[in-house]
Image (cartoon, coloured by chain):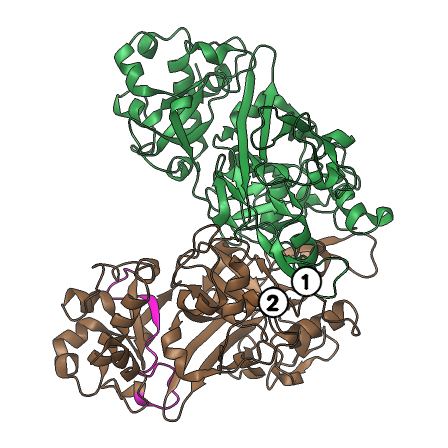
Chain colours: A green, B brown
Amino acid sequence: MSALSDLQATLDPSRKSWVQSANEPSNDFSIQNLPFGIFSDSKDNTPRVGVAIGDEIVDLAALEAAGLLTVPSKAGVFARDTLNEFIALGRDAWRSVRIQLSNLLSRDTATLRDDAALRAKALVRQADARLHLPVQIPGYTDFYSSKEHATNVGSMFRNPKDALLPNWSEMPIGYNGRASSVVVSGTPVRRPNGQLKLPDQERPVFGACRKLDIELETGFVIGGGNALGEPIACTDAEAHIFGMVLLNDWSARDIQQWEYVPLGPFNSKSFTTTISPWIVTLDALEPFRVAQPVQEPQPLAYLRHDGEHAFDIALEVTLRPQGSKQATTIARTNFKYMYWTMAQQLAHHTVGGCNTRVGDLMGSGTISGPTEDSYGSLLELTWNGKKPLELKEGGTRSFIEDGDELTLSGWCQADGYRVGFGTCVGEILPAKA
Amino acid sequence: MSALSDLQATLDPSRKSWVQSANEPSNDFSIQNLPFGIFSDSKDNTPRVGVAIGDEIVDLAALEAAGLLTVPSKAGVFARDTLNEFIALGRDAWRSVRIQLSNLLSRDTATLRDDAALRAKALVRQADARLHLPVQIPGYTDFYSSKEHATNVGSMFRNPKDALLPNWSEMPIGYNGRASSVVVSGTPVRRPNGQLKLPDQERPVFGACRKLDIELETGFVIGGGNALGEPIACTDAEAHIFGMVLLNDWSARDIQQWEYVPLGPFNSKSFTTTISPWIVTLDALEPFRVAQPVQEPQPLAYLRHDGEHAFDIALEVTLRPQGSKQATTIARTNFKYMYWTMAQQLAHHTVGGCNTRVGDLMGSGTISGPTEDSYGSLLELTWNGKKPLELKEGGTRSFIEDGDELTLSGWCQADGYRVGFGTCVGEILPAKA
């Protein structure tokens, strides 16, 4: 059997796992998924590489130590507190590990299934684990690639007639974000202080953000960088991507509106960015590839690629007020609506020679769909606070209040199994006095 | 003698070194300076920590190995290819090393002066050394803090009447830059390709930048970071700064003008940023502290600090065409003109909770003075190409041509000695075909 057919077999919809929970059609972590992350647990608080399967985590460091998993190029990369060293080994190594894990976890493979002692070493319940930031992130870039989002924001902040700026349709507009404040799901989010320009006052005041918002995004993680001066071709770009995460680009709208001209958002976004702990590989997403929207005008040559480069990923946001048991779904949308593809984003990012590095994080930009309930930010959902949302429990919301817990989730649904991202959660703490 | 008086003694203008070249009043690297960098040489190509003195470099790893230099908190930090580990030890360690080096290199200290074998091990001629990027840079931020520069750019790109935007006088406007493409002086700079919007065409074209420019800046290096959610107070900010470098924020003006709305500069600046190899410590700059410009309106409370927080650093830019022996000085200005101080920049950067890390680089923004020959960019010097500069040799320049070598230099001149930065050099290679 060739390596490619081995890889194909890991996507076989009929493959089931002896980890029963993975076989539930609505469990994010089917045997077809196998996303990578960094975890620790109460028995061993050393962060190490794991892969989610059903309600469990497979400890790759333990598997390698037990001789059940071999990395072609370099031993020891799983006993690490970030994925960078593993990712840096390249796509052949990722695929080899995926194939080995899929086989080990398959219902038909007895090795682990029938060895209770080994299973006790190699499996940790997700409920008992702590998940860490999966990668050390050398650089964080955020794009702005949803046409609906850019149009909505342009309508509100500028002019509905010229909502979309002329450059938007020609390139995936992006900006450099702040990598230091990217945190893993579950980390509390402190409401930022900053300069606010109130409409009735001549000068700005200093105080807590009054328009705290989410941005529902995905992010992709660079698996193979490029040298300074050596652009990545659009047609080759996906080979440089290790996988995807959910990303919440928390935004202070009032700080943003006052500070962003002419150099872009700064303090309004650099206080926290949250990502989900599991990186879903591009290999696992392959069956969910769909056509991107038609691009008109046709992009310049360096941004062209044949074929389908969007992915059908259902996305959802819920809001749960403090003390409430009831969360309200405030948005439902899909990654496939994005106008610019990840390949185009990466080609554009590097076309002038900018280098990228293993672990770099690239945010999609807020993912808004065509309907009013598919917008990826409260700014759009409430139209800058003018149309507050009605919660099932906890009143209404124009923007986020202290104690609110915001949860992003995302998944690709196939017939009988799911390739999901888990959740990306943050609860808001009051601003520092 | 107390530690403070020891530190004071390192600034004594009458102190001379047995390294004769350091005593020339126009040599950048007097015994009062002692800037830190990373170097290697033909005898030992392992990058390690050095300090410039006159025309020489003191090898700190060799000094420590010989027992002539002790680091209070941690041995071995000089046998490293970046300064990060040393910097992370904190200000007491920086000062202890400065005091020990000043004493060792002083004309009156025999230890090294009279030991030829030791000197052969511990001194390397700068002419024989290769200088490396001095720090691993986790994050790069660029400010926009020269009032003259912001006014000039605003006049050209927007409206001379409202050249300065309302937020500019209220905060040190900044944006996140791209850390991956920061290189050390001497690294060739490849002219970027990108989207250009020509005035006579409906759609952009792809091609080589036609308006390649410099931005004359300084940068400061974070010596002690802050935790997420814990802002640095303006009054405490200088204690978090290890030192300063020269910084050339190469800019593709045509790419910039088309791409920068609404999220700021991206590909127009991320292709290369060059910094000088020596980090001049804030301690060495202390005698050159001067008052910053009067700030009107008075900044909000979080941006206030008493006393003098500007530094009198003379700055110069020369341009030398390929094959020419004659460089033309195209700008002379001074860091003291900057409206916002480094302390205010750092306080603003962190006031919303953003964390900083050891080695983070913060660019000042283009440093323009009040007169037409003191502007820090060709954009301003030639007024967007309308008034080409006359070179001594090599014709005229509206913007930078292939093969041009641009050199920034900077120094603080005292009576009898200099605290200089050396140079920050880049030669332009033609765009990739």
* Count of marks placed on residues: 2
- Read off the residue under disc 1: A204
Question: Who is closer to the viewer here, B90 or B155?
Answer: B90
Query: Compared with residue A129, is residue A261 higher up or lower down, i.e. above or below?
Result: below
Magenta residues span B23-46
Q: Residue furthest bottom?
A: B415
Across and down, in percent, residue A332 comes to 69, 27
Residue at (43% x, 52% y) in the render? B227
Across and down, in percent, residue B232 comes to 47, 61
Please report, as a chain letter, where disc 2 is located: B
Left or right of residue B309, residue B164 in this image: right
Left or right of residue B272, residue A345 in this image: right
Where residue B65 sits, quadrant-wise, is bottom left
Mark 2 Cα shell of 10 Å, populated few (<14), some (14-19), many (≥20): some
Q: CA distance from mark 2 to mark 1?
A: 8 Å
Question: Who is closer to the viewer here, A174 or A120?
Answer: A120
Across and down, in percent, residue A158 comes to 80, 52
Left or right of residue A71, residue A389 in this image: right
- Read off the residue under disc 2: B300
Query: Compared with residue B112, is residue A299 higher up or lower down, i.e. above or below?
Result: above
Question: Which dot marks residue A83?
Answer: none
The N terminus of chain A: image quadrant: top left
Left or right of residue B365, residue B166 in this image: right
